Amino acid sequence: MTPNNGIMSGKEAFMQRIASRLGRSNPMQTAPEKPVRGVPEHYRDRILSAEERLDTFISNWTALSGKVLIVDEATAAETIGQYLLQVCADHGITRAARWEHDALNGLELDAALQRGGIESLVWREGGDAGLQRRELPTGPEGNWSKRIGLLQAAEQCRLGIVWPDCVIANTGTLALFSQGGKGRSVSLLTEVLFSVFRADQIVTRMGEAFELFKSRYPEAVVMPSSLNLITGPSRSADIENDLTIGIHGPGSVYAVIIQ
Amino acid sequence: MGDGGQKVLEPKKAHSTGDTGSGHTGHEPETSPIGSGLKKRTKEALKDDFLRKAVAFTTDKLRGGRLKAADEFGDWETWRERGRAIRQHTISHLDYYLGQFADNVVKNGGNVHFCHNGDDAVSTFMDIAGRHRAKLVAKGKSMVSEEIHLNHHLEEQGIDAIETDLGEYILQLARETPSHLIIPAIHKNKRQIADLFEADAGRPFEPDTKTLANYAKQKLRNYFLEADIGLTGCNFGVAESGSITLVSNEGNGRMVSTLPKVHVVIMGMERLVPTFEDLEVVLNLLARSATGQKLTTYTSILTGAKRPEDLDGPEELHVIILDNGRSEQLGDPIFQDVLNCIRCAACLNVCPVYRNVGGHTYGSVYSGPIGAVLTPLLQQDMKEAGTLAYASSLCGACYEACPVKIPLHDMLVHLRHRKVKMKLTALPERIAFKVYQTMFGSVTLFKLATKSAYYLQKPLARNGFIKSGPPPLSGWTQSRFMPMLPKQSFRDKWAALQAELAAKPRNGAPAVGGDAKAKGGGGHDAE
């Protein structure tokens, strides 16, 4: 569904001024000839093999303190379920959120969480049903108390499970096309980010992730409102240059790679 | 998460760039004019040992990170050239790309407000805030909002604006302004931060990073949840899709553009790239140049407000596009390229002036070499802000560090030239150059002057050096010894040297005649 047009104000005089400063009588209406486009050619042409992409991603992800588990496709559901419970135990997680995503649904992680006595929230309308209501951090009054229950409940999940749309090897980055069941909050409001993806989703460089994004959504009006590139844990060095991990977003990041 | 026990939100009043608070000492927002206050601020900074150590340490770390990242990446010069070409092309065709960008934002359901100056932008923001009866604004990092003194205006209207970048939040509590583009609280130590948090929370704090960070994290979390409006800057707009790109390491940029129902972006009109392909170039350059990271932790590319199928994200998106003196640079053969800047702060980290005095000395929102160029240009003020062009050694380190090759060192010279042309330099300086011109225009006067200088300096010199001179010489001798002028200058020796060279051919070369080109020479013959 495409959105309704927004409003525009002050454009004409503003653009006229720019055009005249640039020596044109009217603002340019046709696309100018571009002398260069995108990354240098030698960089664009450097394609890594599947094995190199996997190794490069792992090396970059772990350098950022990210954890990696490689699982075999045949036993993926069982192995990932066990690993997820282990991670939850390590972090004392009692409630987790996950994307509403076909591949994630197939892994039956909710059942695994249930076995460990962990509540799970699925990012869909009513996905918070059945969760025990908890007191809001901001109290019963104010803006937050008026927001949808799903959002309030997600804010109280300390682990988020996502399935990236694409993974970038040479920067160690998860690319999330956040839209619909793939909510932004799941990878943002939690303390632990647990990502699961297939090894063949790893691309060499950022530009390939953008190419996938644009091929999937050729028109801007159908693009997801948020494309998030996540490269390691949330960090800050604002206090005397001491690195602080997990300042606003997740401080622990996991990548489970299915081969 | 959340802090469990805390229910009441009582945000501190936002600092204003025009209010020095009361009784607080330190780097308060500067009220004295940029130019005439420069000396005073420099002296204060030079006396602040912690500040100087912190600035040196941080800039060393960031500079080292950049060099290492560039080296690992390989072909850095090719990348710089590519970055320069993309930015220059964009700025040269800004009428096309900005039009395309704005049209796409609107097609995506966002609202675009073009604002000629800071007042327009402030009143546009106030209209939006008023329509939503906003009481609390959560701010991501936005230099443009500092540029237009937005916090000050919001405070006047009784609206709390909370800085959510950890460094900016610390400064807000201290009622101070940022001193670095990337690490704004570079000049604060843990004890000072603990004191600020103690005053805020009414309980004691250990000066320990984890404790301090946790307090800020809990406190800011509630602001994210409660804010009526999230305000951010924009690192890059993508013209082909109308997307807003935000980068942050902490994740506060994501928070303020996801949780509040209204997201307002304030951006300079030049912050664009044509396509996603070009975005890949500038994102690679920005992260590596700013901190030495391969990519900033969070890069969000936001296209419109939330879609009908989304369950989170802002319901309303406003993009305020600001000119505020930027268009004056368009078409200027010398200064147009300053708009290519991607705000990475690499030039600050290598500048010998910035590294010694930090950002507050500049007395303006933008500091370092880019600030020294940008501030007078944006403010159209050569008299006061133009003085910043003298806060430079003209060494060119800024140009070498710049990922988009802005010739800042040349621009600084041109700004000085402009100041001279406008007769805005100090009277003693004008007189000095007049004397210089007269003296160098006459051989007789020049000879007389150099001879006089030798005898005039004698009372001041000890063992061949002037160690403590009167003004204006004291500017040099307070940190260095001035070698004495020799009794016999190179010019005086020239005839004898020529004869010597003619008499003694070297390395089998034929003896040179009277028009020989002597090499070297001219050393000081201190008595």
Image: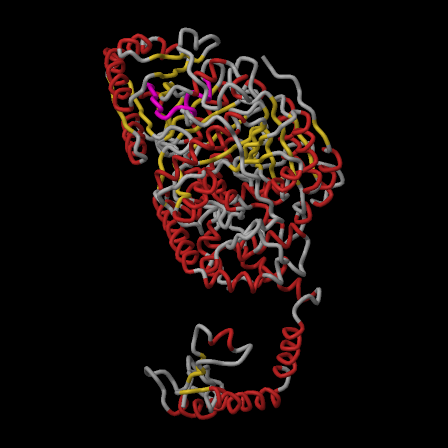
Q: How is the image coloured?
A: secondary structure
Q: Nearer the viewer, residue A251 or B151?
A: B151
Q: Residue A29: horizontal and vertical position, in percent? A: 69, 32
- Using the rendered image of the protein, determine whether residue A28 is visible from the camera's viewpoint: no
Figure quadrant of the C terminus of chain A: top left
Q: Is residue B161 left or right of residue A181?
A: right
> In which quarter of the view is residue A192 placed?
top left
* Residue B490 horizontal/vertical position (percent): 47, 86
Q: Nearer the viewer, residue B6 or B477?
A: B6
Say whether residue A147 is visible.
Answer: yes
Image vertical order of residue B118 relative to residue B335, above or below: above
Residue B439, picture quadrant: bottom right
Q: Which residues are magenta?
A: A183-198
x 71%, y 45%: residue? A21
* Horizontal relation, residue B173 to residue B57: left or right: right
* Image location (x, y in percent) of residue B104: 62, 26
Is residue A191 found inside the magenta-colored segment of the image?
yes
Magenta stretch: includes residue B229: no
The quarter of the rendered structure image containing the N terminus of chain A is: top right
Number of on-image labels: 0
Q: Give the x, y percent position of residue A255.
A: 31, 24
Tell me: residue A160, above or below residue B73.
above
Observer-nearest residue: B523 or B244? B244
